[in-house]
Image (cartoon, rainbow, N blue to C red):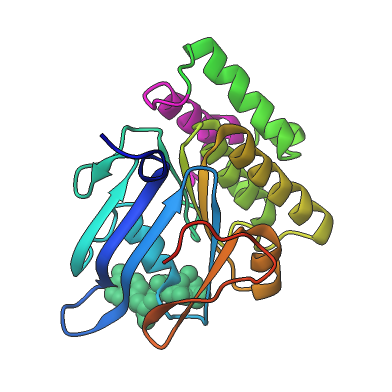
Amino acid sequence: MLSRSESDIIVKLDGVTIGYEENNPLATIPSLLIKRGEILAIAGPSGIGKSTLLKTIAGLVSPLRGTIEVCGATLPKRPLRGDLGYIPQRLGLIRHASVMHNVLIGSRASMCGSMQIFTPKEAKESARNVICEMGLEHKIWEPVKRLSGGQQRRVATARTLAQAPKVILADEFLSELDDETMSHVAETVVRYARENNAAVILVEHDVSRARELADRLVVMDDGRLNPFISSTKTLEVKI
Ligand SMILES: Nc1ncnc2c1ncn2[C@@H]1O[C@H](COP(=O)(O)OP(=O)(O)OP(=O)(O)O)[C@@H](O)[C@H]1O
Ligand SMILES: [Mg+2]
């Protein structure tokens, strides 16, 4: 039987080395535990391997070594569809399809996840709500390719929120947004995490913003994931 604190862990990395070639590892993460409801930020210089780390946790790139557990499934076994939400740095939207169509992909995934079960009608309603939340109601039937970079980024965030995930991996999801929109989108994602006890792992190149948003900040440097702990925030799970 798991203790309460163990059952609160929703992402667990153990002895993980990430990279694309055995003889050229990008980073080693001896141990990283993320709790339900926790917001963890990852910062570090360009090219250090932040996106690769998220892709590895998402199960899209295999780790060179080590084990990764997400929502109770040890990779390569995948979590239930819908439980893991991923906002890629390159968005991965269907460009010729409408905003609604893209976000509905997330809502439909939520029908398979364990957090919330939507009927098809509710899925459409939830997609519409989250599109409005992202300030895109006037673009709802517009093909994504006709949206600005920041608007497309908000579509990708909406798609993930509509999924009702237990874990969100967000790669530079606030890029290309003006200050006001950025605050609103950040607040929406943080509120989602707090209200649903969902974990968020976000990559953010701006360290002060990362520190503001997250409960815990880790900085990738020199091919290692170094704990860099914000002194103002409570740290309950140690790396
Ligand atoms: N599919 C791939 N195959 C081989 N190497 C890759 C692949 N994708 C990325 N890389 C390399 O891995 C390294 C880390 O890339 P990654 O995209 O993870 O960096 P990052 O920290 O997210 O950078 P940025 O802040 O610019 O987004 C880079 O040297 C990159 O060239
Ligand atoms: Mg990146």
In the figure, 188 relative to 112: above or below? below
Q: Is residue 123 left or right of residue 192?
A: left
Q: Is residue 71 left or right of residue 233?
A: left
Residue drawn 51% across and 28% down? 104
Rendering coords of residue 126 (x, y %):
60, 23
Q: Can residue 140 be seen from the camera position used here?
A: no
Q: Residue furthest right?
A: 180
Q: Can residue 55 be seen from the camera position used here?
A: yes
Rendering coords of residue 157 (x, y %):
58, 45
Give the magenta-colored segment's residue range: 93-115
In the figure, 178 relative to 44: above or below? above
Rendering coords of residue 62 (x, y %):
22, 61
**Residue nearest the viewer, comparing 78 with 38:** 38
Q: Quadrant of ligand 1?
A: bottom left
In the figure, 237 relative to 71: above or below? below
Count of all numbered marks drawn on residues in the image: 0
Residue drawn 25% across and 41% down? 73
Give the position of the N terminus as an image quadrant: top left
Rendering coords of residue 214 (x, y %):
62, 59
